[in-house]
Amino acid sequence: MSIPISIEQKPRPAEQATHIPCVDPATRESLGEVRIDSPEDVEAAVARAKVAQQAWRKTSFEERRKVLRKLLAYTVDNKDEICLTVQRDSGKTRENALMGEIWPTCEKFRWMINNGEKHLRPERVSSGLLLHKKARLEYHPLGILAAIIPWNYPFQNIVNPLIPALMAGNAIVLKPSEWVAWSSAKFIDALRSVIEEAGHNPDLVQAVQGYGPTGAALARSAVDTILFIGSVNNGRRVVEASAERIIPVVMELGGKDAFIVCDDADLEQAVHSALAGCYINCGQNCVASERILVYDGIYDAFEKRTAELVGEFRQGSSREGLVDVGAIVTPLQLDIIEKAVNGAVAQGARVVTGGKRTLSDKGDYFEPTILADVKPDMDIAQEEVFGPVMLLIRVRDDADAVKVANGVAYGLSSSVFSKSRVRARKIVAGLEAGMSSINEFGGVTYMAQDLTFGGVKASGYGRMNGREGLRSMCNIKSVVDDRFPIHQPSRVFPVAKKDYGVFSGVIELIYGRGLAQRWRGFLKLFSREK
């Protein structure tokens, strides 16, 4: 999900601009305009969210589940309308909208409804040597979550942070990408209406729309935590803003995922998984399989088979018929993809199929592309493309595959294909990534909601999803309580002459090496030495 968005990207509109023009990238049809929020509007939205959150934080888990169930019902009942809205604002296919926006969102609702309370109830832990005390961890709401989100999944990117935020007792203020402002406004209005119909203040969910200044104002506002999904450069700006008030952030940034095809892999399984990894959502996917590392023994067969299938892909708008891949969401991203492919060819990569813009008379499209003979040090093998481009990189063996896979700045997801589970697991263990899948496209980890989602290195830090993602939206409070009603003071002052010797003995008794040292510690407890 690491695309140039929100904080300082997109050409600046005229200073006097008051609205965002919205366009369907598949047809270049105007969708209308969305009003730009000023820094003052951002402050007002955060203030409204704070008021709403004060009441929401006191609700029971059952009441929160009730609201999530109603939001899930809205999603299922209106899935066709949601998909059509996503198609018009992002240019993706109908099938990608259903499988990439609706299905993961519904699964997240289901998981949170069934498991959220379990992970947020006070948790008893050991009190260690404090035998007269009990210890527990409590999970309290942080307050207001600011979510600065990209354009590649207009519906899912809104609901993804909203679900754990509400379950943990927080309110949320969203700053969607300006590129999908039209659909975002519709979705957020609908979600607010569901919350209001459930008997709660719709100000629990706020949206602020605009360009860089709006995102910057939200990052510097009186929120309590920030989730940022976007590019590395914009992520740095968000971290700088968060540091001004010392608030926690979760950074979900770039990816350059490795997809390793061993020489003993099942060819058809690996090929079809690679197609999913490269061309779902037209490659505009944070966990896209941007580098296909294929062993010498299977390389030629893999290239031939993928070329056969990709050459048959249909491209266009789903509203005009059945297609396999859709449009590129933003004209800026189309420029980035074209520049990356042309640069790779200039550096020696070979175009197997595709490689250029297409359907330019209709919208913003780039052909499904396969580049072969890509070298690990080429620019396109190091920098995120975020488009429908499969890069075939030849590797010799397991050690070479791991070296090449780890030889980039990113570390989000990864995939390994082999018929040997032992071999695949060994390769996975050596990969520098936040997620790995064996004999599956790496993005499937998102559907296992008990798993966390996030990366290492330049792919960010912190986690979404699962127990850890939910608890990242909480103040985790450590509490020591009485086990027995013993009301004797633990005297520290005034210091007595014997104190040092006694506590030295205690330390040796508990932590000493071997029986002899521990026995000496025991004797010190009764020694008359000062």
Image (cartoon, helix red, strand yellow):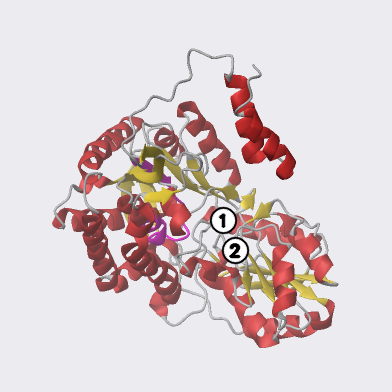
Q: Is residue 116 visible?
A: yes
Indicate whether 39 appears above or below 293: above
Q: Is residue 373 visible?
A: no
Does the stretch in magenta take in 159? Answer: yes
| Residue bearing the label numbered 2 | 387
Residue in the picture at 59% in, 18% down: 498
Height in image: 11 above or below 191? above
Report which residue position mark 1 lands on: 333
- Image coordinates of residue 408 in percent, x first then y, are 73, 54
Q: Is residue 400 left or right of residue 481?
A: right
Image quadrant holding the C terminus, namely top right
Q: Please tell me which residue lies in front, 263 or 90.
A: 263
Residue sitting nearer the eye, 125 or 181:
125
Q: Are marks 1 and 2 in contact (CB under 8 Å)?
A: yes
- Alpha-carbon neighbours of circle 1 within 10 Å: few (<14), some, or many (≥20)? some
| Res 391 → quadrant | bottom right
Q: Residue placed at 37% from the left, 45% from the top? A: 138
Number of numbered markers:
2
Residues in magenta, as a range: 144-160
Tag 1, which secondary structure? helix
Q: Which mark is residue 215?
A: none
> Above or below — where is 56 with respect to 155?
above
What amino acid does circle 2 point to?
Answer: Gly
Q: Where does the image place residue 376, in percent across and percent down from the top left? A: 80, 61
First in sequence: mark 1 or mark 2? 1
